[in-house]
């Protein structure tokens, strides 16, 4: 991805900065700082946020941070005295002096108003906590590119004018209002958040968070709660997504409908819905070519045809088409995290691991509150046997989104199987069943056979072959991508063979078995 920061063009994939025709190489640290500041679109980035996203929470001294900011300024032709591009907000953080020139993400967007959180504790001086949570939630929600989030000064006006939900809808076209309260007592913090539809005043969800919050940990806790709130309210499986389809006003929102249907497909893997999306999305994209959501959805629909053989068309190479769609999604909106996830997955299946890492890292930095972003990157890490990284992301994804698709559980299933804990593995894969998705049934067959329940495994194998009659042939090609997990492949193949599945695969070499 390329982006212009002031008069410098930064290539985040090639790790270069070009100004006045001269190209300079960037360190990963400098690139990370510029990426975070660019992703904030001119908004303020605190020191803690910068350290968490660039140094991944490692302890960083003020001197180290100062040196790193100096290098980032030098990369874009700035200096500490001029602060023409990167401004220091003393005691708080940093921001670009002008928001990057990026395209508006979507023509049709739902509008969210985050009303200022109320301090209902006994100490009026705790108002700073409420204000901080409001700001953090605004920042996290703005990362969901399919939503329009009203600025803080607008919601302050809503509060001052005393607008009710109908008034917000009439004056600012607000679809959903988020209200919250904060109560602090000693070293405990209780935050209550409520999402309301302005259409009819219905409360869609109420979340409450109780956390220990000492003076030293208060800001970290505040950040964690804001990220959880954003993910649970605005995430792909959150309350807004669940209710939004009912609000679609007319046929001008065709793309919105298709993206909502894509999210449904992503949960249930229905082949008929996949076929509908594959046919309908190109037509809709011809009419709305700047829809990053639409291009990202189309990229993944094509990728599912490639990696899971859903409605596979003989003779058509869909991986290049999927990659092109992902790149067009990024071109439409360079801040779209899921577009980078789509590109990361395409690069992984093209065995471009360096390219995968670059796209995956960018996705995680753009929206760490999107559970699908976390889970997809986590599973890609699991394919590469980066198990600890994978489980960390998946645990966070399921914490953010308690309602989620069954495929969120695959990588944790693999960890239990690797440890020989087949009972736990079977419970994990069956936590959210995905009937009809052949890999769900393949896992159940594998684990039931490993537990010695061969009768149940044979019945499940029949279900597997009804869902995907060509499983025994096509799985050989898929398993070649699992060379980093040779132990799991060997275990799965041996247990599939116990119930009569003819898998001609040599797990020792990672290649099809000799005839």
Image (spheres, grey):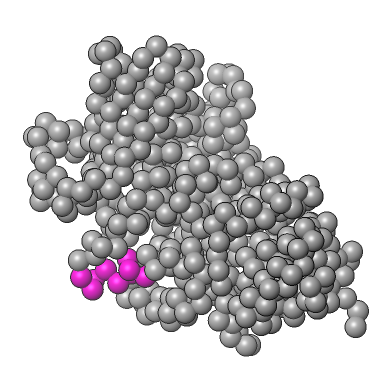
**Among the 4 quarters of the image, the one containing residue 497:** bottom right
> Which residue is painted at 28% across and 48% down in the image?
204
Image quadrant in which you'd find residue 114: top left
In front here: 6 or 496? 496
Residue found at x 50% / y 32%:
50
- Specify the segment rendered in magenta: 250-258
Percent x, y of residue 300: 52, 67
Please tell me whether residue 220 is drawn above or below residue 202 in the rendered image. Answer: above
Q: In which quarter of the image is residue 438?
A: bottom right
Seen from this angle, which residue lies furthest bottom?
314
Q: Position of residue 57 (x, y in %)?
A: 58, 29
Look at 54% across and 32% down and name the residue there. 52
Count all numbered tags in the image, as a single digit.
Answer: 0
Residue 176 x %, y %: 24, 48
Secondary structure character of the magenta stretch overall: helix
Does residue 61 appear left or right of residue 129 in this picture? right
- Residue 104 visible in rendering: no
């Amino acid at each position: 991805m390329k982006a212009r920061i002031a008069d410098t063009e930064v290539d985040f994939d090639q790790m270069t900065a070009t100004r006045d025709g001269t190209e300079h190489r960037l360190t990963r640290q400098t690139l990370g700082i510029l990426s975070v500041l660019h992703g904030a679109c001119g908004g303020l980035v605190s020191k803690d946020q910068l350290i968490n996203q660039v140094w991944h929470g490692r302890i960083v001294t003020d001197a180290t941070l100062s040196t790193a900011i100096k290098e980032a300024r030098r990369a874009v032709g700035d200096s500490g005295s001029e602060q023409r591009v990167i401004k220091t907000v003393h005691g708080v953080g940093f921001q670009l002096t002008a928001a990057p020139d990026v395209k508006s993400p979507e023509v049709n967007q739902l509008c969210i108003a985050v009303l200022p959180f109320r301090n209902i504790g006994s100490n009026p001086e705790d108002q700073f906590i409420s204000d901080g949570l409001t700001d953090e939630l605004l920042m996290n929600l703005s990362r969901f590119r399919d939503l329009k989030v009203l600025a803080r000064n607008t919601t302050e006006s809503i509060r001052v004018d005393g607008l009710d939900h109908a008034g917000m809808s009439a004056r600012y076209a607000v679809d959903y209002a988020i209200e919250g309260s904060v109560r602090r007592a000693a070293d405990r913090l209780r935050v209550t958040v409520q999402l309301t539809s302005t259409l009819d005043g219905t409360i869609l969800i109420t979340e409450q968070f109780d956390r220990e919050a000492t003076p030293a940990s208060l800001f970290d806790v505040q950040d964690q709660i804001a990220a959880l709130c954003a993910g649970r309210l605005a995430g792909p499986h959150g309350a807004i997504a669940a209710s939004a389809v009912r609000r679609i006003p007319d046929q001008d929102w065709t793309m919105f409908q298709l993206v909502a249907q894509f999210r449904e497909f992503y949960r249930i893997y229905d082949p008929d819905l996949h076929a509908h999306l594959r046919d309908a999305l190109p037509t809709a994209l011809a009419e709305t070519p700047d829809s990053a959501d639409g291009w990202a959805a189309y990229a993944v629909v094509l990728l599912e045809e490639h990696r899971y053989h859903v409605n596979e068309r003989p003779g058509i190479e869909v991986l290049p088409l999927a990659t092109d769609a992902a790149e067009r999604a990024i071109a439409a909106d360079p801040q779209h995290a899921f577009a980078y996830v789509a590109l990361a997955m395409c690069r992984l299946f093209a065995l471009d691991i360096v390219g995968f890492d670059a796209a995956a890292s960018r996705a995680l930095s753009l929206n760490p509150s999107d559970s699908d972003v976390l889970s997809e990157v986590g599973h890609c890490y699991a394919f590469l046997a980066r198990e600890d990284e994978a489980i960390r992301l998946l645990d966070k994804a399921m914490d953010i989104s308690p309602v989620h698709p069954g495929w969120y559980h695959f990588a944790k299933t693999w960890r239990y199987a690797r440890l020989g804990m087949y009972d736990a593995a079977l419970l994990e894969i069956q936590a959210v069943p995905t009937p009809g998705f052949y890999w769900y049934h393949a896992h159940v067959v594998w684990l039931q056979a490993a537990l010695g329940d061969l009768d149940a495994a044979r019945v499940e194998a029949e279900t597997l072959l009804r869902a995907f009659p060509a499983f025994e042939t096509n799985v050989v090609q898929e398993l070649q991508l699992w060379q980093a997990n040779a132990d799991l492949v060997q275990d799965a193949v041996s247990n599939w063979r116990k119930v009569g599945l003819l898998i001609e695969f040599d797990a020792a070499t990672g290649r099809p078995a000799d005839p």
